[in-house]
Image (tube, grey):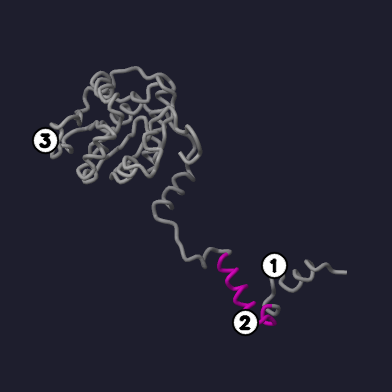
Amino acid sequence: AMSRIDEREAEFPAAPSAAHIERLGHEERDCYKRAAQLATLDGLPIRAPAELTALSQQLGSFREIGLIDPPAGLKASLRDYQREGASWMQFLREFGLHGILADDMGLGKTLQTLTHILIEKESGRMKHPCLIVAPTSVLRNWINESIKFTPTLSLLLMHGQSRKSDFKFLKQYDLVVTSYPLLVRDAEVMRDQEWHIVALDEAQNIKNPKSLAAQVCGSLKARHRLCLTGTPMENHLGE
């Protein structure tokens, strides 16, 4: 004896013949037609964005992340893992992706990021300045390390009331460094500027998406976005 499932399969076979479909009612025939459309995606009212299609094609031929050659102007010797980190950033840039560099403290996230920025400058791809957003306590560290390791990058430190006189000159610099509080205060100016790279240091500062700092960071116009943090997740997956 046939089970109830067998009976249903007999009534609605997976690959019905034309004769079988003709015996069905109007609604059943429409269901089969719709199912056939969905099977080939022709019936879906959406299409993949051109950027997603291009990324799919790129990833289809991807094999591995190649190691970068340190840029000519870099005044530092990269450790193997630092070279791998800078190579990974270059991979993200090439494929139009953004990322989080979550190395532990002291492993050279600053140097890896400066190397990435210098490669962009020396390659001629950097048509707009890059922006570093960091806690006030480490702003000078970014300036000092850039002077030491990437001296060919022109620098602007946004600090104090005098910074306002530099607003109209932002595009003349390779690297602009500011703090989270000042980014919020200067949001209108910073949103108007196009950035090649925006890198957030100690990026756990924007883990609350409802915070004003997180909203301003998300509204910046940048080709490539990076987060640098030793603590990408502290309490829950929502971060």
Residue 90, placed above or below residue 74: below
Measure how far apart labels 2 and 3 are at the Cα level.
73 Å
Say whether residue 145 is visible: yes
Judging depth in this view, the residue of 215 and 103 nearest the camera is: 215
Q: CA distance from mark 1 to mark 2?
A: 18 Å
Q: Nearer the viewer, residue 121 or 187?
A: 187
Type of the residue with mark 3:
Ser
Residue underneath mark 3: 165
Q: Which mark is residue 14?
A: 1
- Report helix, strand or loop for mark 3: helix
Magenta segment range?
21-38
Q: Nearer the viewer, mark 3 or mark 1?
A: 3
Q: Secondary structure at mark 1?
A: loop
Label 3 vs 1, first from the N-terminus? 1
Callout 3: few (<14), some (14-19), or many (20+) C-alpha neighbours within 10 Å?
A: few
> In this orientation, which residue lies closer to the viewer: 137 or 46?
137
Camera-near label (1 vs 2) is 2
Closer to the N terminus: mark 1 or mark 2? 1
Splitting the image into 4 quarters, where does residue 141 fall?
Answer: top left
Residue 121 in the image: state x and y as whole percent: 25, 32
Foreground: 106 or 179?
179
Q: What residue is pinned by disc 2?
A: 26
CB under 8 Å between callouts 1 and 2? no
